[in-house]
């Protein structure tokens, strides 16, 4: 199978590598010519066998809109576009409708795994028609971790369902990170009693009910910087947490924990708290997200 990837940033480049390592032929395009395989979208499309499959992996919002619009002028009936970025699920409806005017199919894919996905594999949540999802399964199987498919992949529903599932996933992620971060601050505060904060978190990795990959990443961050002295407690949010709360309000679903987590990030932009240092460190560990270093 031969697919094209548009966008070779932290995630896109790692996905290209993992796909190639698992037998998928990939041609990638990026605005940065140093990492791009071709010189433009038109050249990318020309390299792909028909019917084509193009994976879009660019920042959500306007950038994705522009790429989808350009692809709509270059692709032909029967081709398939997969948006694997963090687009809002409502954008999927517009993108699918635009591509459908020329007979191009559309799948939305929520992707989790961060910078570690190249080695460990990516968790995938997809939305679209059953026949198009089946068509793209060799790509999804190459990207996901080894093991049972239903433990790392879900066809969540029709168009929009993949990004909706990823939005809720990220809302939960916000809350989990915030819980670990608050625990870190509480332990760090009692330095008269707790003499090894990193050791406490490390001891929780096996046998406890709070063990998780996020906990392992926090341990890794503390191993690198036990006091988180090199990180400023300033945490950005990429949008999904806000969208989760907005969707909860629209459907009268109480999400107090997720809401508190996003509001805590707003607090971080005012105070350099230890808890927010822990959240910033976690985001850097799993996603390679930039952190502000302490002066």
Image (spheres, grey):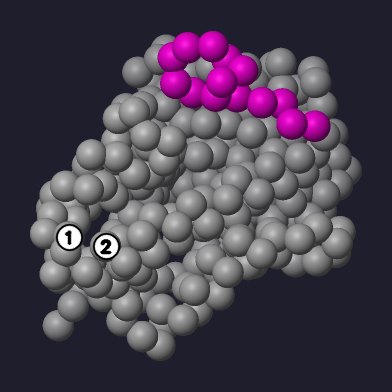
**For the point 47% across and 12% down, which residue is it?**
147
Relative height, residue 59 to residue 185 (above, below): above
User: Would you name the residue on which mark 1 appears?
Assistant: 194
Which residues fall within the magenta stretch?
144-157
Task: Locate residue 283 relative to residue 144 in the image: left or right.
Answer: left
Q: In this view of the protein, can residue 49 be seen by the observer?
A: no
Viewer-nearest residue: 192 or 237:
192
Q: Give residue 285's position: percent from left, percent from top.
A: 30, 50
Query: Residue at the location (48% across, 52% down)?
Result: 176
| Magenta stretch: includes residue 152 | yes
Q: Residue at x 63, y 67 (%)?
A: 259
Report the residue marked by disc 2: 187
Between 290 and 39, the residue placed more toward the observer is 290
In which image quadrant can residue 234 be found? bottom left
Q: Secondary structure at mark 2?
A: helix
The reply to whether callout 1 and callout 2 are in contact (CB within 8 Å) is yes
Q: Is residue 198 left or right of residue 152?
A: left
């Amino acid at each position: 199978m031969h697919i094209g990837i548009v966008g070779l940033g932290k995630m896109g480049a790692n996905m290209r590598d993992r796909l190639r390592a698992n037998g998928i032929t990939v041609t990638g395009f990026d605005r940065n010519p140093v990492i791009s395989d071709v010189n433009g979208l038109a050249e990318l499309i020309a390299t792909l066998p028909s019917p084509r499959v193009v994976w879009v992996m660019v920042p959500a919002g306007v950038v994705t809109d522009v790429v989808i619009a350009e692809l709509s002028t270059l692709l032909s009936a029967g081709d398939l576009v997969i948006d694997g970025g963090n687009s809002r699920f409502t954008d999927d409806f517009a993108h699918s409708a635009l591509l459908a005017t020329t007979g191009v199919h559309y799948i939305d894919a929520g992707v989790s795994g961060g910078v570690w996905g190249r080695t460990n594999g990516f968790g995938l949540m997809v939305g679209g028609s059953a026949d198009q999802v089946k068509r793209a399964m060799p790509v999804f199987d190459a990207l996901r971790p080894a093991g049972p498919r239903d433990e790392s992949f879900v066809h969540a529903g029709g168009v929009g369902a993949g990004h909706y599932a990823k939005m809720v996933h990220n809302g939960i992620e916000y809350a989990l990170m915030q819980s670990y971060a608050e625990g870190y601050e509480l332990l760090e505060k009692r330095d008269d009693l707790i003499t090894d904060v990193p050791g406490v978190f490390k001891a929780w990795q096996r046998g406890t009910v709070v063990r998780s990959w996020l906990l392992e990443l926090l341990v890794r961050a503390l191993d690198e910087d036990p006091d988180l002295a090199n990180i400023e407690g300033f945490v950005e949010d990429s949008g999904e947490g806000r969208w989760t709360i907005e969707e909860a309000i629209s459907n009268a679903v109480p999400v107090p924990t997720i809401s508190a987590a996003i509001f805590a990030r707003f607090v971080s932009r005012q105070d350099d708290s230890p808890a927010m240092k822990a959240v910033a460190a976690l985001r850097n560990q799993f996603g390679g997200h930039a952190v502000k270093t302490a002066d």
